[in-house]
């Protein structure tokens, strides 16, 4: 950046919105976020459901599933980079042909690799929140339903789920937020490749600003990202308040 | 009959969860087993168990990653940042709750508002400004930044908790002649213990593993934290898998050990942090 500051009005934003690369990156990010939010929450809920049903070794499993959260995004990406490019390929060559080419070399599969890795990281964390939700469901209501002859599925649908709405709100929005700003897994797993097909928006901002040295455009993108995250967070607060009043 | 069915159901659940669990931790196990292999052995079959347990990879990786140095940097940054965040935020939140100044309302509002801003949105001007006043390239600058980035969430959580503490205890201490500082450190702060654990857990996990901020601030290899040195190490030795895997294991190990010891607190901290 030069020492002279020229005011350019909305020029940076025009450059941004007419840039093909930006929209590609944004679309990829949206795909990634939706797939990851749905998968993470489904798996986390499923884990929490089983791990609150009173089976043996619950606390062991809980601690085990959470452990992937202790690993930072960079190391996590490197671990899965190794799994996708070496272990899966080995399995593919010997057992399942579907895996024989590295996922990281194919644009669509690389995005799924990214989704899978993030799901692996966050499902343990969200599981903990869902477990807290399951535990908060009052036991006497469940007992009363059992006496009235409700089966396990009916109890889950009519009692447990309504009580767990706050947990759902927290988890879904948390995954949304984290999805939009993910950077380190992206960097260490795919480096945005192949051919920039998995370059998520955060990485795009970084590249624009620090590698291409276009600070102005980079900051315009970053501001756009801020607006999205702010909308997600504010709608969480709004929705959370409304649902709380209904209960 | 019904009881019997339920028993079967339970076994089924244990089996299902065990299978999922094995799939879930298999990447970590594979990293662990391969960390003992030579490159030749690895290329032959990455799924097999190592035929011999040799620690040569660890010794080499320890040296090449400059592990001790990176570890001590990470520990210093994490510990100092967390301690200061806890100390400053709890005091700030206390004043914000207990003094009904109009100014306090604005400060609190600004702090909560700043939580909406993702790091990426401010990193560019941050790098420019801190670069121009020569505050880059030192772990102390990094600690300073972490305190700034961590304070608003911590104040928010403490604020919610302190509101629920009855005033009577503090009044009693005041009547006994305690100063403001004494009231805070002897009466209020001990009561905040559960919240303090929550904040310490959240901040430690975040700071220990953070990559983007140290990557922007710490440019000299001598200053690098663990995530930075691991990434660099991985880029330098891309073909020697045994070596890379032992590097990853060493990076992950310190937190896993802490987790094994403090597991109960960590999980409790996560739950409390998420509910707020």
Image (spheres, coloured by chain):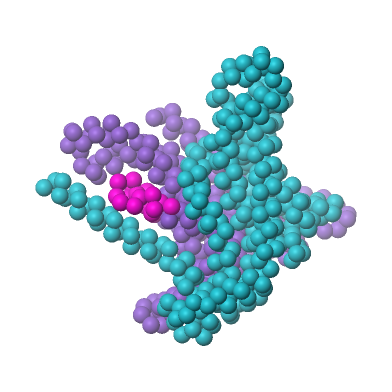
Which chain identifier belongs to the purple chain? A
Residue beneath the point at 36% across and 78% down: A96
Which quadrant of the figure has residue B110? Answer: top right
Specify whether A41 is left or right of A157: right
* Residue A55 painted magenta: yes
Where, quadrant-wise, is the C terminus of chain A in this rendering? top left
Closer to us: B183 or B147: B183
Label tally: 0
Is B226 positioned to the left or the right of B18 in the image?
right
Residue at the top extreme of this rendering: B175
Q: Is residue B89 magenta?
A: no
Q: Which residue appears at 64% of the width and 18% of the height?
A: B173
Query: Looking at the image, which residue is at 66% across and 15% down?
Result: B176
Left/right of residue B99 with respect to residue B254 in the rendered view: right
In the rendered structure, which segment of residues is drawn in magenta?
Answer: A42-63
In this view, the residue in front, B170 or A242, is B170
């Amino acid at each position: 950046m030069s020492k002279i500051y020229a005011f350019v009005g909305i020029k940076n934003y025009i450059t941004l919105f007419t840039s093909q690369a930006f929209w590609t990156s944004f679309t990829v990010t949206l795909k990634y976020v939706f797939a990851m939010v749905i998968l993470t929450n489904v798996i986390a809920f499923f884990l929490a459901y089983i791990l609150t049903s009173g089976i043996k070794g619950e606390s062991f499993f809980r601690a085990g599933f959470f452990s992937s959260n202790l690993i930072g995004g960079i190391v996590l990406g490197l671990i899965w980079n190794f799994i996708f490019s070496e272990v899966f390929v080995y399995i593919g060559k010997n057992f399942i042909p579907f895996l024989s080419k590295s996922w990281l070399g194919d644009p669509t599969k690389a995005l799924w690799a990214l989704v899978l890795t993030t799901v692996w990281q966050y499902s343990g964390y969200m599981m903990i929140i869902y477990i807290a939700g399951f535990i908060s469901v009052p036991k006497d209501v469940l007992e009363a339903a059992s006496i009235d002859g409700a089966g396990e599925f009916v109890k889950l649908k009519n009692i447990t789920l309504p009580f767990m709405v706050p947990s759902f709100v927290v988890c879904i929005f948390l995954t949304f937020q984290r999805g939009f700003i993910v950077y380190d897994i992206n960097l260490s797993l795919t480096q945005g490749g192949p051919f920039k097909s998995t370059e998520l928006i955060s990485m795009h901002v970084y590249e624009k600003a620090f590698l291409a040295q276009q600070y102005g455009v980079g900051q315009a993108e970053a501001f756009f990202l801020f607006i999205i995250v702010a909308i997600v967070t504010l709608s969480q607060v709004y929705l959370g308040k409304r649902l709380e009043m209904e209960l | 009959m019904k009881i019997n069915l339920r028993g079967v159901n339970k076994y089924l659940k244990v089996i299902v969860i065990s299978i999922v669990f094995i799939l879930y931790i298999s990447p970590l196990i594979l990293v662990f087993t391969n960390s003992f292999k030579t490159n030749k052995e690895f290329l032959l079959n990455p799924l097999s168990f190592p035929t011999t347990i040799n620690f040569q990879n660890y010794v080499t990786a320890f040296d090449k990653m400059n592990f001790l140095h990176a570890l001590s940097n990470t520990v210093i940054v994490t510990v100092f940042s967390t301690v200061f965040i806890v100390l400053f935020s709890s005091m700030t939140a206390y004043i914000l709750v207990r003094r009904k100044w109009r100014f306090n309302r604005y400060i609190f509002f600004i702090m909560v508002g700043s939580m909406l801003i993702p790091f990426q949105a401010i990193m560019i001007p941050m790098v420019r400004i801190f670069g121009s006043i020569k505050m880059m390239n030192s772990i102390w600058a990094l600690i300073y930044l972490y305190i700034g980035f961590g304070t608003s969430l911590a104040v928010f959580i403490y604020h919610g908790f302190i509101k629920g503490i009855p005033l009577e205890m503090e009044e009693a201490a005041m009547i006994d002649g305690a100063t403001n500082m004494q009231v805070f450190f002897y009466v209020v702060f001990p009561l905040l213990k559960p919240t303090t654990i929550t904040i310490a857990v959240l901040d430690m996990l975040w700071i220990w593993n953070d990559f983007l901020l140290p990557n922007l601030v710490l440019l000299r290899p001598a200053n690098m934290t663990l995530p930075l040195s691991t990434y660099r190490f991985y880029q330098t030795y891309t073909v020697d898998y045994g070596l890379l895997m032992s590097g990853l294991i060493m990076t992950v190990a310190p937190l896993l050990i802490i987790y094994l010891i403090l597991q109960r607190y960590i999980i409790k901290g996560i739950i409390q942090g998420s509910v707020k």
